[in-house]
Amino acid sequence: MRLFTHTVGTRGASLTCYIQEPDEGLKNATVRPAALILPGGAYMFLSAAESEPVALAYAAEGYNTFVLRYTVGPDSPVAAAYEDGQAALGWLRANATDLHIDPAKIVAVGFSAGGHLAASLGAFGPERPNALVLAYPGVEGPTARAGVSLADAITPEMPPAFLFGTVGDDVVPARQWLSLLQALESNIVPFESHLYMLGPHGVSLAKAHTSNGRAAGVSPDTARWFTDSVRFLTAIFGDFLVSGEPQDYSQLAARATYGPDMPIYRLIEEAGPAAVLEVHIPALLERLRGSAGSAMSLRQLSEFAPDHLPTATVERISADLARFNEVTA
Amino acid sequence: MRLFTHTVGTRGASLTCYIQEPDEGLKNATVRPAALILPGGAYMFLSAAESEPVALAYAAEGYNTFVLRYTVGPDSPVAAAYEDGQAALGWLRANATDLHIDPAKIVAVGFSAGGHLAASLGAFGPERPNALVLAYPGVEGPTARAGVSLADAITPEMPPAFLFGTVGDDVVPARQWLSLLQALESNIVPFESHLYMLGPHGVSLAKAHTSNGRAAGVSPDTARWFTDSVRFLTAIFGDFLVSGEPQDYSQLAARATYGPDMPIYRLIEEAGPAAVLEVHIPALLERLRGSAGSAMSLRQLSEFAPDHLPTATVERISADLARFNEVTA
Amino acid sequence: MRLFTHTVGTRGASLTCYIQEPDEGLKNATVRPAALILPGGAYMFLSAAESEPVALAYAAEGYNTFVLRYTVGPDSPVAAAYEDGQAALGWLRANATDLHIDPAKIVAVGFSAGGHLAASLGAFGPERPNALVLAYPGVEGPTARAGVSLADAITPEMPPAFLFGTVGDDVVPARQWLSLLQALESNIVPFESHLYMLGPHGVSLAKAHTSNGRAAGVSPDTARWFTDSVRFLTAIFGDFLVSGEPQDYSQLAARATYGPDMPIYRLIEEAGPAAVLEVHIPALLERLRGSAGSAMSLRQLSEFAPDHLPTATVERISADLARFNEVTA
Amino acid sequence: MRLFTHTVGTRGASLTCYIQEPDEGLKNATVRPAALILPGGAYMFLSAAESEPVALAYAAEGYNTFVLRYTVGPDSPVAAAYEDGQAALGWLRANATDLHIDPAKIVAVGFSAGGHLAASLGAFGPERPNALVLAYPGVEGPTARAGVSLADAITPEMPPAFLFGTVGDDVVPARQWLSLLQALESNIVPFESHLYMLGPHGVSLAKAHTSNGRAAGVSPDTARWFTDSVRFLTAIFGDFLVSGEPQDYSQLAARATYGPDMPIYRLIEEAGPAAVLEVHIPALLERLRGSAGSAMSLRQLSEFAPDHLPTATVERISADLARFNEVTA
């Protein structure tokens, strides 16, 4: 991991970057989706529980992540934070190659005031995230565009959004989220929303280590919002590419039959099958006895080392082994 | 996060350290449990998918994490890796304060050969992890002590262990794990074990980004081993301390009654209750109209700002509000 | 289980009753919460996938369950179904003792048109369910009270409600649910809502066996709405009462110490501890060798059979066993 | 559901049958897998918590289920229970058509002594279940065949088995399960095993309503053994057949474009697109205004009612709507 802090915008906002770098042992993860984390704090401060712990949570799901500590304070206009967010998005896209991220797969993840900021980036642009995760977002109040409310600013260009909150929140009431969801719906913006009944404002990941010591902020049920958000994003961005087939039951069942799929150590254990191997592959058999390679089947060994065990030999051995299946049945 | 690499042992093994530092906004997480990650690779190489991604996964659960890249290679004895592990444990404990970890809450998390190494650290000591997570561990083969098998080395001093594997594994057969579990059981070492039926060797976190592109290594079901391991460790180490009470339904239900628990914005919306507030707190009422603070109840506002709203005032207002409940019913 | 069908209302609506009866082996489940299942079908038919499978799902969570096949058809007014629902609620409460249900813990679970009906029962009364689970409910359209929309009918007397749907639903658009949630919110009715992004109308439990063969209706993620609904209801109704303490790690750890918590079979296995038992309880030791009871500890055996093994004896044995701990360490 | 009790065997053992019958609204569930539930009770009694609640849990997953109350008592040989089990399996297979079950998809689910019985049916035959779920099974003790232990009786004909238990169990120690798993492994019988660290004997589904009031028996983590068992069985038996495609994100995204996939109510809301509809389908437009059908897109309406809205008309409308997309962008 490369960990560094970059300054964005004109007011000294910092962007802490958690970059997982390409590795030949992770060959389908050379380019990653990006999560831009926007902590909350009423545009007055920046919540620690909504900063690095969240960056690590998305990093653990394969994202390269970025915590933006945007401009806040009693005299700071919302527009300042908004400009920081625009600058961060622009810098991420301009440096996507170096950051090993896909510039078309950037999610802004905002909490409370940071959710207001994330949604504002999606609503106003011109740099828009490609998806939004809004955790108990502030919705009312001034936006970066004077006189335009957040809900009113939403157009069909708004990225798809995931919204999570608790009805027990007494800082941002649920009606604010419902008005935001209605704006999404009427603009046909795909969304997902999980509003849990119980829980206070500001639960972050709803785990003990992000609770700042407050029991009311911990809930294994509510904590599922995070994994739900990852699934939501995967539906939009796609997952890291994989190929080949999953293992299935028939493969395991085939191991119980004397033949090319039975583990070699099992063939060796019984006199009859062992004698067959002795006939066809005496030297190889000697090397296999007691070695870790004997956990493989003949078929697997042949794929792994075709020079030592050609397919044709496997077929001949299998034909000779077939009679032991009759004896067993 | 502080990210750095430290050299341990006499052969240049490296320990990459992911240190989450204390923050006043995370006040119950100033000291964290530690996870020492031991990647697999048959003592010949070190698997990338079992290194940093695992460190990040435990970091996201609040751990400070450490990836040990121990000595491997065709001519390297198992004892060399073992000595690296001992050195790493010793260094972690000697520097626990600076690393913000609890020296009595160190789990060794090992995969395949790394699982063999983790179990060896627990079996032989003298530096022992406080718990073990063994993912499809190698069990047979030479150990750091000539002629003593891993299973035979286990005594009641072995730390509690979590063992995960797949029966479909054809590199380390399940019988090896079962012999290890039996050694734990007969020494009354508490353990937990999840052996899934399907899946190949080396699935790491069983997610796409740790699969190295192999579909057979991805399974949302098998991936639960990780969260199960965290729960297992929490049962042993305890969780980050929290205090106070969780929110419950009765608190939400109380909000619907005219009184000290109803959100202030709701009291303001209706003429009768608003008039009561006008009588008791005219100036405060003016400030509350349209402000974010109006999402609070009178009781909460009184707790938050007792100088502006004394308890006695809340009680008087509540008495006057009571009659509206009769009207509603 | 007692399974029978009762006719309710004036039009021959049927109520299929799945009654789990008291059993001395289930002594904290003599009175159960009740789930009144209201299948969907546009008030034209009744969906099989939203009937018995749902009744069985809640039954498996400990509920006594009831499927109401209310009056439907092209010429049937919504008010007819509503009257059936009122009659069913009345009958459940009048016969609560015989049905082994708590008359104050009745949830109406409605799907699509059945969700419209469930919400109508909660909105209009006079018999109201104690909680609502609304799966992709219809919200617009005529109600049982001419000219009054469902959303407008909601008052603070509405029971707490759980609402689930998919944004991909093209039969009931999400805006309908949002308007319903807003009506709940503005009446301070506690609610929970899970709106998943993907999925068509009518997924029922989102499992293969309730999909009627349609792949789009199956999703292990969306299927979580059901378990979420059970958790929601438990927060309101409370759970079946339990007492005593859960097992914790310290209890397991104590088993590894020679003393009253070590399994007796372990004490017997070693010469020294076995000799101690031989001194104190020779006859009992004879009976314990090889018996299933030897899995217990002395403390447990003493609790189970104090006449055979008094507490004082356990204490004397424990004192004599203590020295073996020193040897081991 | 058809609920009835049938007598099997020669000693009056009862089989309670929970039969979900075919329904045209559940057309992929006309034939179901079967679960034969074998409660525990040390062959002395039959545990209520391991009987009907388990039958209902598998029924809720689509199984037809059967609780066998086999012969128990102080003087009853294990062989009597075994014969009851053989008789039950024989009767299930002979009556598979009437019971709407697949005779090749019968799982025996046994708890404690019932797990011993289930495993015995699999080991000895001749009627064998097609899969086994063994919850904290007894393993030691006499079997139906004198002098042959359960573990020794296992051959490759043993059906695949799922084994669950808790290491905290002090009635059946984990070593018994490990010896059973080893017998499976050495006979190459596919298996899955979840041994949780904490929890006493006899937790059944580990939920409050099956705990008989004992807090130590309740754990949402341990309760996952049940869903894990269903997944295990699905891997072996296959799932209920479904066809067609799941919904994906691109389908939702397409709804935001003026054209055949946009919901009709949205087209109607705006003057331009509404005028296009007015030109092409004036009469249909009149009927769609305010109707539930307007939630469909033109493409869906055309599929649903091709006589009223031919494909060619949809194409012409779509061509005319295309220009509105340019205006929006």
Image (cartoon, coloured by chain):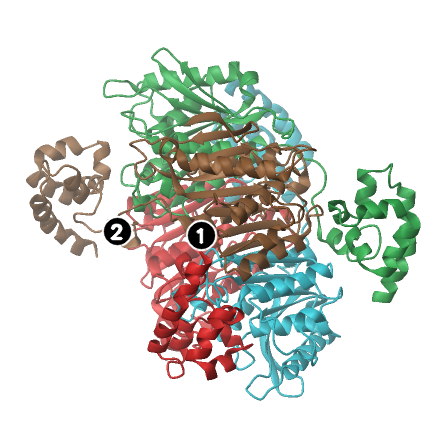
Chain colours: A green, B brown, C red, D cyan
Which image quarter: residue B290? Answer: top left
Residue bearing the label numbered 1: C228
Q: Where is residue D36? Give x, y as percent.
A: 62, 71
Vertically, is B63 above or below B8?
below
Q: Which chain carries label 1?
A: C
As drawn, the residue found furthest toward the top would be: A10
- Nearest the viewer among C164 and C83 is C164
The kind of secondary structure element at disc 2 is helix
Residue pictured at 64% horizontal, 61% vertical: D181
**Quadrant of the snapshot with the C terminus of chain C:** bottom left
Q: Which chain carries label 2?
A: B
Vertically, is D108 above or below B173?
below
Whether residue A196 sits left or right of residue D170 in the image: it is left
Q: Are marks 1 and 2 on the same chain?
A: no
Q: Can residue B94 be spotted in the picture? A: yes
Q: Which amino acid does label 2 sit on?
A: Gln
Whether residue B235 sits left or right of residue D204 in the image: it is left
Residue pictured at 39% horizontal, 76% vertical: C302
Q: Where is residue B252? Give x, y as percent.
A: 28, 50
Residue bearing the label numbered 2: B251
Whether residue C3 sits left or right of residue B283 in the image: it is right
Q: Can residue C29 be spotted in the picture? A: no
Vertically, is B20 above or below B202?
above
- Nearest the viewer among B131 and B141 is B141
Q: Where is residue D178? Give x, y as percent.
A: 61, 62
The kind of secondary structure element at disc 1 is helix
Image mark for residue C300:
none
Q: How many labels does the image show?
A: 2
Q: What residue type is labelled 1?
A: Asp
